[in-house]
Image (cartoon, rainbow, N blue to C red):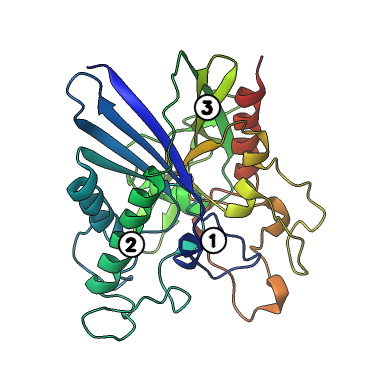
Amino acid sequence: MQPARMELSRDDHPLLELLQSVDRPPLVKDPYLFVMRLTSIGAGEPIAVLVNWSGHPETLGRDNSEITADYPHWLCQYVEDHLGGTAIFFNGSVGKLSTLGNQVALPDPETGEIAQDHTWKKAELIGTLLGQLVERALKSGEAPTVNAILIRKSILFAPLENDHFRLAEATGVFSGRKPLYSDGKLDRSTVEKELSDTGRIRFPTGQDIQTEVDYVRLRSGDRVVAEIATIPGEIYPELTNGGITRYPGADYPDAAFEPILRAHLKSRYQFILGLSNDELGYLIPRAEWDDQPPWLLNRPQRWYGETNSVGPDAAGVVLRGLVGIIEQR
């Protein structure tokens, strides 16, 4: 532990949005880049740079069989080489935002051609460009004196409606770490089921998954200078920035809209850390939930997100929980 000077910066450079592709309506992105740099007061040496941006690290595609950090490797490498210290990358509103596809087109300076999807070169170009944008952002950062840190946490229970998650618990995928709850109490009840590929299993029947949200507020006097909100999953950007939309074919067309996260944050520097402390899969607005045909906008096949979500109520549980601890007196 050592005394440190903190700098905060953000960037809304147009390139940040162009590095994100969206394949499901509404076409809302979360392009904001937030950066926190810590420097030792005594020696003036860099300690760490925290980078917060949104985009699935999947540039190499689903057929890649090698273990890789994808574009965050080159992002962190650039930051450490040019700014020093340890670079730490946190993904943000990662739901449905990807670096794949021709929406994200980067020229390879070695060939003059557009870097192809599923290649190391494209991952390198994206990460390096993001590192350069971090460096650019810090040139206009500010260094507030923080004299108060508030930390709040809330334990939540999200209804589990996706039987794939129950099957994962039953077959040991979670190694017993995700037991189910009913009415806020641990519920280990099961029923016996016969599955063609795995045989007889004890299928858990509890109602809810337990999860957690957290909120950190940094103050300088009466001014809120920065905030950190944790999201236990992959949240769709319209839930953080606004833009939830009703479409024909939605399963709950009259559902109330969830709170919009950034509307409740009070600072210029709003760090949203996705996949924090838990992974509930995709957090999808209930009004856009589409698990039964007809599909949204008469699409001929189903959308992907619902397959990997605990259910249509999870987003509301998470956002109402977060807003509750943000607004708490």
* Disc nearest the viewer among 2 and 1: 2
Q: Which residue is mark 3?
A: 225
Tell me which residue sits at (59%, 78%) in the image.
Answer: 301
Q: Amino acid at mark 3?
A: Val
Cα–Cα gap, marks 1 and 3: 34 Å
Count of labels in the image? 3
Q: Secondary structure at mark 3?
A: strand
Q: Which residue is mark 1?
A: 305
Residues at marks 2 and 1, CA–CA distance in whole angstroms: 28 Å
Which kind of residue does numbered mark 1 sit on? Gly
Binning the other alpha carbons within 10 Å of mark 2 as few (below 14), some (14 to 19) or many (20 upward) gives many
**In x, y percent, where is residue 137?**
41, 47
Residue 291: percent from left, percent from top: 63, 63
Disc 2 marks which residue?
Answer: 129
In the picture, which quadrant includes the C terminus?
Answer: top right
* Name of the residue lying farthest toward the front: 139
* Figure quadrant of the N terminus: top left
Residue 45: where, in percent of width, then height? 19, 30
Direction from residue 329 to residue 190 in the image, left or right: left
Residue type (three-letter) at the residue carrying disc 2: Leu
Kindly give the residue lying farthest to the right in the view shown: 254
Q: Badge 1, how many Cα within 10 Å: few under 14, some, many 20+?
A: some
Q: Tell me where residue 111 sits by quadrant.
A: bottom left
Q: x%, y% of residue 39? A: 26, 29
Say whether disc 2 or disc 1 marks the residue closer to the N-terminus.
Answer: 2
Between 12 and 167, which is closer to the camera in this rendering? Answer: 12
Q: Earlier in the sequence, mark 1 or mark 3?
A: 3
Which dot marks residue 203? none
Viewer-side label of 1, 3: 3
Is residue 224 visible to the viewer in this orientation of the structure?
yes
> What distance separates the C-alpha of mark 3 from that of mark 2?
27 Å
